[in-house]
Each structure stands twice: as structure tokens, then as C-alpha cells.
Image (cartoon, rainbow, N blue to C red):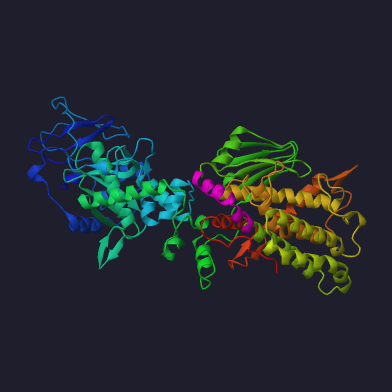
Amino acid sequence: MDPDRAGVEGDGGEEELELVLEGWREWEELGAGEGDARREGEDVVEEAEARDRRPPPKSHAARRTKYKGQRTESDEVESASTQPAAPRAQGEKPVAKSHNTDSFETQASDATPPRAPPSAPASIDPSDALTPADEPSLRIMALHALMYCERLFYLEEVEEIRVADAAVYAGRRLHEEVAPLDDEATERRSVEVSSAAWGLYGKIDAVRRRDGAWVAYEHKRGRCRREDKRREAWPTDRVQAVAYAVLLEEELGQPVPQARIRYHADNVTVLVEVDDAAREELRQVVRRARELRKTTDRPPIHENENVCRRCSLNVVCLPEEERLAESSDQEPPTLFPSDRQRQALHIVSPKAYITRSQDTLVVTTEDNKQKVPIRQIDAVLIHGHGQITAQALHACAQHGVLVAWLTAGGKFVGAAPVSVGRVQQRLRQYAGLTNPETCLRLARQLVLAKVTGQLRYLLRTTRGDADNRGACQAEINRMREVLRRVPEAPSPDVLRGLEGMGAKAYFACLPRLLRPGTPPEMIPHGRSKRPPRDRFNCLLSFGYALLESLAMRSIVAVGLEPAIGFFHRPRSAAHPLVLDVMELFRTPLVEMPILGSVNRGQWDAHDDFDVRPGHVWLSDAGRKKAITLFESRLAESYQHPYTGQSLAYARMVELEVRLLEKEWTGCEGVFAQMRLR
């Protein structure tokens, strides 16, 4: 009989149980000695693979039914399935099993007194990797990330940026399938371990007795490494398994000479020896992790492009965009998502009330009640006097959903940002944007991009119309003069003056771009704001408010501080960095769609507007039209001239913010390269 499967038979046929550490109880199988069948190395793996050819069980009831009075073909170690209790030898006393799911626990017979806990093995010497008391412990999973890519480790553990992609969710489902505990198993799963000496903590997938010693098991969804027809653990997995083993050894006070990694994609179990070399490798990895946590600089991108393609944080890291800056021969980036994955939820009813029901937001109005899964939302924009409960706000913060408030007239009031931590990221931003040279360089790039976009739009719209081109020629020449002077501007103040000159010339031409027959009420008379004094300016102000909320949530999603900008000065409650990012997108996301909608006759000069003495607001119907127009524009795609990738405009705003961050992290000249054709 397999001693690991059925318990160990001793000389007297009795099992002895002991209390090892406070809060821990374990099976201690005695008397095996000469009767143990010692299986080592590849023999264990080969035998396990030959036996295990079925998927893990899916329920406790199914396991109990299957194991009732029969043996299975599954190897209990590799598949982590539960096994039946061992038959007792003749004369053996029954042992009462414990149902405590949080610890190794059984109850001994009255004749077997507990023994004192054994001392820790002399082989454990973590003093070399001792973590200072004021330094937080590391997740063992973080070591896996560090071995995979140092920048991945830094993003996840230092800046606390974590993105769960399809592969991550698949791995979680695998652990959920193999982790449930059966009361009749001699194995314990999802065992939490920690060590102040090593400065590590984590959760072992499974812990089991093999040949008289404890073994830590780790389950992996993928395939093992094959080197010269040998099956090996990947270095990232090996370090993780060794860390679990040494922490388990310290916790139990008993040697854990081995860990095992089960690769489910090819049904292979790989043995990992926990020897001196493995411990030294672990020490080196922990030291490197501590070094990276002390710096504010992100490590460089991985030299292997294939590593980046499989990384869940490639949409944050943007490695291909950095390689493109280093070499023009680089293939166009493909890692950044092209389409918008979540949508904004606009609340326009003044009596709307937002509550939470599990992972769903419930919007109640006078007419109906609507449920929206929170995972489908990237922002909640409350126009006017809608209300939201504290529970709903908590859910939004938990899922990274920004909540913004706007007045009924469209003025951006404020937002509840969702980013926490990001200390090193914002220290880099502060260091970069307090450098006058960096700010001047970025301001030049921004003004150049904005005025170029406005000029190209005027030229494109007046092409083939000699009268309009002639009427706008003076303004066009003035904008060209601005573009000529921007690269040599000596200060941000001069750049702000040049940007103002270009904007004045641009808005002077806008009325001439409206088609003949446009209702006179829809024709603007210059640029007016706070408050807008005509219908066209009312649409512009409302569109800019929507753009401001989009820029805000993009900046927050990236993790930057909206209050620290490089071009706009903090003269009002508006965030300077938000205003900086807005300048790139005012023309393509607000002015062009509004001008096109007016030329198409989509607006009713009476029903869509609320005209008061001295100002004009949108009516409820007009507000809904404006929101629909803006959101439709965000869904349209445009090819980014720098990356060559076609992106939805909603994704392009976030991409520009991420490229902006690279400007002060060693990759200059990538921000504000977007141009209208």
C-alpha cells in the first residue's frame, strides 16, 4: 500500500499525532521506518504521470461519491485531488479526524500523549535575507514577477499597479478548482505562511506528507520547461516553490527538503530540491527585490519582446512604444488595446439615485430602475443634482471607477479619484515637472501639436472653397507664423502668448466653416464662456466639460497627479495637468463633432437649449444629444501617427497620458506627436 495515499503502517499499527507550533497541528506518521517504500526523483514523476489523466474534481460531493469504497487513477500529489482514509491494520485503534479547515489537525488516542515541538532545523539560516523591521514584507508571488521581469515587479509591488487579464483569471479558476478541502484528505490546501526573518509571506497551494517529510505543492496552468528532453521547472516557478518550502520549514520546525510543481497543461509534476544552492538563489532574489523597492526609478523594459507580449501589464508599461523611440525599424505597437473596454455612465436626471447591489450599480429615476454591472463602467458622470450612496462610491473606488460631478450647464465641478499609492510614480512626476527645461520642452511639443491640428482642420474644411479660403487667409497666415516661432520660444510665458494668438485666429474662422442656410441662432459671435452667450458656445463649453472629465479619469487611471502640470498655471480650481492634456483633443473630440452636427442640422434651436438673459444652457433633451455625440466620437478610431496603431479616441487619450509619463522617465519625444491629417 502506498504510504502517502493510505497512511503509514507501523509496528504496532497505531498512529501518533503531535502539536507542532501554536495554531498549527499536523499529521505525524510514526513507525514507518523500514516499511516505507522510498521513491525519489524521476521515478515519482513518471509514476505520477502514468496515474494522473483526469481533471481535478469539481465538488466535495462528487469526490466523496467517487472515493467511496474505491481507488482512483489520479495521483493525489500532482492533481491535488482528495483521497480516501487508509484502512486500519488489525488491532489498530481508530483515530478521530478533525474538521478544522484552517490548520493541520487530528486528535490522538488517549494512550498517546503529545510530544514537545521539535526545534527548527539547523539548515534554515535566513539571516542573510533579514528584512528591516520598518520594511513591509514581500509577497512570494512578487518574487515570481521579479524573476519574470524587474519592471513588472516594480509596477506591481512598488507602484501597486495590477491588471488581471484573461490568463490571470484562468490561473485563479485553476486554483479555485484544486484548492477546496475535503474533510477526509490527509492534505491541507491554501496554507498561509509567513516569515519575519525572510520578510516574505504567501499562500501555498497544497502541503502533503511524502515519504515521512512535508512537501509544498504549487499548481501552474501552463507547461513545464523542456531542456534536452528533460522536464524542468521554469526559473520563476522554481524560486517561488523554494520560497514556499523554506517558509513552511520555518513554520513547522521540520526539514522540507523538496517542493513540487504541477503543470496542468501537460500533466507533468516537476521536483524542486530545496538545497543550499536553492536557498542562496532565493536570498539573492530577495535582496534584489529590496533594492528595487528603495528606488524611485522604474527598471528598463525587458530585452526579450516575447516576454512583454505575454505580460498582463504591457498596456501600462508600453514596451513597444519605447522600442519604437529607440529604433525606427521597430514594428508598429500592438499591445495597447485599440478599443474601449468599458463605458462611461452619464446620470442626467435631477432625481436620479445611485445605489449598490453586490457588483452592480442600480440607477433609480422617476420613470424606471436600471442595473448596470460595475465591471462595464470606467466612470460615473453625474450631471446636476443626482445622488449616489456611500456604498456605491465604495464599489466604484474598489473597481477603479472614477465618479465626477458636473453642473447642469456642463461645468466640471470635481471628481473622486480612485488611485491610491503610486508614491514613487508621483515623485518622478514632481521631479520631472519641476525641471524648467522639461516643462519648456513639453510645452513646445503641446503648442505645436495643438496649433498644427487647428490649422490643418481649417485648411481641410476650406479646401475647394475659394471664397472661404480667401476670407480665412489672414488667420491662416497668422497661425503659420505662430508655428514658425514655437520651436524657438524661450519660455512658457511666450508659448502661452503664441497659443493664445493661434486660438484667436482659429476661432475667428469657425463661423465661416458653417454651411449656408445654418439657422442664425446657431452661428457663434466670437468665443464666449463662463457663461456662454450663444448656442454654439454653449455646445463648446459642454463638450469641453465632458473632455475635462475624460482627461481627468485618464490621468487618474495612469496614476499621475492632476494638480502638477507643465503648461497651464494653477490659477483656478481646474487641475493644470488636466488642462494640458485637454489641449491635444479640443479640436478632434469637441470642435469638429459639434461643427459637423450643426452643419447636419441635428440641433433644434428652441427645444435643445434653455436661453436666459446673458447666458444659454442646454435643455435636458439637448444635454442627452450632446452626451451621445461625444460618446459616439470616442468610439471612432484614428491612426496614431507616432505608433501607427488605429485606436478609439477614448483609448488615445489614455495612450497620450502614458506617453507623457515616459517623457520624464528616459524616453523623450514621444508625447504630443498626434496630428490631424
Dividing the picture into quadrants, the one containing residue 102 is top left
> Of residues 580 and 657, which is closer to you in this image?
580
> Of residues 584 and 61, which is closer to you in this image?
584
The image shows residue 543 at horizontal and vertical percentages of 75, 51
Q: Is residue 321 magenta?
A: no
> Could one spot residue 340 in this view of the protein?
no
Up-down: is 639 above or below 545?
A: below
The span picked out in magenta is 423-441
> Of residues 6 and 451, which is closer to you in this image?
451
Q: Is residue 426 magenta?
A: yes
What is the quadrant of the C terminus in the image?
Answer: bottom right
Which residue is depicted at the point 72% across and 64% down? 485
> Of residues 388 and 307, which is closer to you in this image?
307
The image shows residue 465 at horizontal and vertical percentages of 85, 73
> Could one spot residue 568 in this view of the protein?
yes
Q: Seen from this angle, which residue lies furthest top?
A: 110
